[in-house]
Amino acid sequence: MKSSSDDGRKTRPGSQERLKRGFDILLSGTGLLFSSPLWLAVAAAIVLEDGWPVFFRQSRWGRNGTSFPALKFRTMYKGSEKERSVQAGAHDPRITLVGRFLRACAMDELPQLWNIFRGDMSFVGPRALPINEIQSAGDSTVPDEAVPGFRERLAVRPGLTGIAQIFADRDTTRARKFRYDLLYIRRQNFRLDLRLIVLSFYISFLGRWEVRGGKLKGAVKR
């Protein structure tokens, strides 16, 4: 069975996956190497404001329903999440001053380059959902597994960025975000991945990842 890329050429799904994985290894490895001085600066800022630890580990849904420990720079005050993860809302008091800056530029997710290098994640794909996260929008009592589209999105590796991460409102429902994820799964190809990565760097440069509403509103036409 063959699939078409958006430039009209035919490529085998296996070939696309190898290309995607090779690109992930190359880009994440390069990113880990060249961002290492930045890691030291971020770690120092976190410790100066709120002490240790520097990193935050969280169990997240992986491909085919597996789980993996996602690694991030800590952006919340110590003790903010003792049991179940609760999705951060606008002006969340649990977020530190350093954390607000890191989240706006997505620098808190730099350690996930290691997750990408390991193969837990890809640069582009559905968001790696925290397992049993309490939602800030919609029915927070409904588990992820009961939301339409959840199982389908597990067919691919979760991503650091993607259509939902870029275009969906942060506070919209999981069902709506999952529809964006399914759109990506149906249309995924290397060219689309590159476009989404470029847009993600642009949003990071603007510091708009924490914006409620359109992250690209007024910047580019959708």
Image: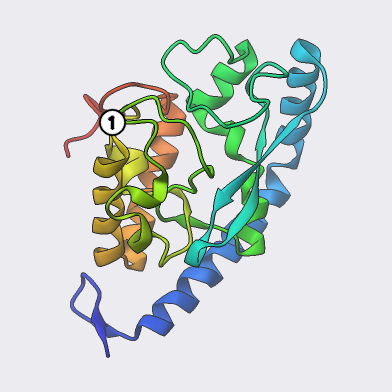
Q: Please name the amino acid that badge 1 sits on.
A: Thr
Seen from the viewer's position, the closer of residues 135 and 119 is 135
Q: Which color scheme does this rendered protein use?
A: rainbow
Furthest residue in direction front, as rendered:
141
Seen from the viewer's position, the closer of residues 128 and 13 is 128
Seen from the viewer's position, the closer of residues 170 and 190 is 170
Residue 221 left/right relative to 128: left
Q: For residue 96, which quarter of the picture?
A: top right
Residue ID at (27%, 24%): 213
Q: Position of residue 208 (x, y in %)?
A: 40, 25
Which residue is label 1 attached to? 172
Q: Is residue 197 visible?
A: no
Q: Secondary structure at mark 1?
A: loop
80 shown above or below 91: below
Q: Quadrant of the N terminus?
A: bottom left
41 shown above or below 16: above
Residue ID at (23%, 26%): 217
98 shown above or below 15: above
Q: For residue 29, which quarter of the picture?
A: bottom right
Q: Quadrant of the C terminus?
A: top left
Q: Position of residue 131 (x, y in %)?
A: 53, 45
Q: Position of residue 141 (x, y in %)?
A: 39, 33
